[in-house]
Amino acid sequence: MEFEEWEPVYEAICRDFGYDRAGDERARDCLASLVDDVDRSELSSVRDATVVVAGAGPSLTEPDALERASIGDVVFAASTAVDVLESSGVDVDCMVTDLDKNPDTVRRLTERGTPVAVHAHGDNLEAIREVVPDCDDEYVLPTTQAEPYESVKNFGGFTDGDRAAFLADHLGADRLVFVGWDFDDQSVDEPKARKLEWAERLLYWLERRRDDRFDVLDGRRGAIDTDAIPLGE
Ligand SMILES: Nc1ncnc2c1ncn2[C@@H]1O[C@H](COP(=O)(O)OP(=O)(O)OP(=O)(O)O)[C@@H](O)[C@H]1O
Ligand SMILES: Nc1nc2c(c(=O)[nH]1)N=C(CO)CN2
Ligand SMILES: [Mg+2]
């Protein structure tokens, strides 16, 4: 996605959460100073593949979610969804994270050669400084929600899970299959519930860009009213 297309959505997110764009840019520049722009061919298997996009909602532990997770050619998992899947015997091909939950998993995956898309934003500068230097940076794919800069890319998306879907789309995935997504999770706090609202809105946007090649677990396809919550206006 070109930054010009993403920017109005980004501005709406910043307004909604009171994020400071300069803070996102500082974290992005720090990440750029830690990770070089190298060719990352290990994700080439995504092209034309069925990609499972795992969120870290409570339903991920249900047997039918784990069964669905094993039907994809490739598995992209957000944050702690990696630990849940791997403890159930489902291997993950790419992790997407802002480093706020399970840094040891991030280190372990890069050391074994599994790419981790590490997101820099205004509230995780310390985590970037702490975790990224310990990783095998050949397997760190640096991302930002601000304008891309040097090695740090912007594929679109906001929360760890929807960024995983935008990344898979960017890499040429054929079908996206969603597991572990609980938009109406009553156990989350208010800021997290608002993040999940954005995730839902952004996945609907992605769905419209992708036509049919989108498969949401619980029949939500097309059920989100974006007129009620305008995107980027
Ligand atoms: N019910 C849910 N609870 C948590 N995450 C969910 C849920 N449903 C889907 N997800 C997806 O799984 C991802 C889990 O990542 P994580 O819990 O680290 O959140 P995050 O995006 O870093 O936001 P936060 O700042 O609130 O932690 C979320 O980003 C979201 O996209
Ligand atoms: N500035 C800022 N940006 C974010 C934040 C956050 O807490 N602060 N959380 C996100 C969820 O992955 C994504 N982006
Ligand atoms: Mg996170």
Image: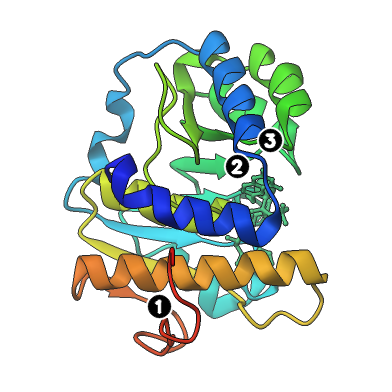
- Position of residue 24 in the picture relative to residue 53 (left or right): right
Query: Cβ(mark 3) to ligand 2 < 8 Å?
Result: yes
Could you tell me if residue 85 is visible in this image? no
The residue under label 2 is 97
Q: Is residue 139 above or below residue 201?
A: above
Cα distance between the residues tagged 3 and 1: 31 Å
Query: Cβ(mark 1) to ligand 1 < 8 Å?
Result: no
Mark sitting earlier along the chain (2/1)? 2
Residue for point 47% across, 72% down? 201
Residue for point 42% across, 81% down? 226
Residue mark closest to the camera, 3 vs 1: 3
Q: Nearer the viewer, residue 23 or 89?
A: 23
Query: Cβ(mark 2) to ligand 3 < 8 Å?
Result: yes
Mark sitting earlier along the chain (3/2)? 2
Q: Amino acid at mark 3?
A: Gly
Q: Nearer the viewer, residue 51 or 230?
A: 230
Q: Is residue 132 above or below residue 193?
A: above
Q: For the residue labelled by badge 3, is the local secondary structure a helix, a strand or a loop?
A: loop
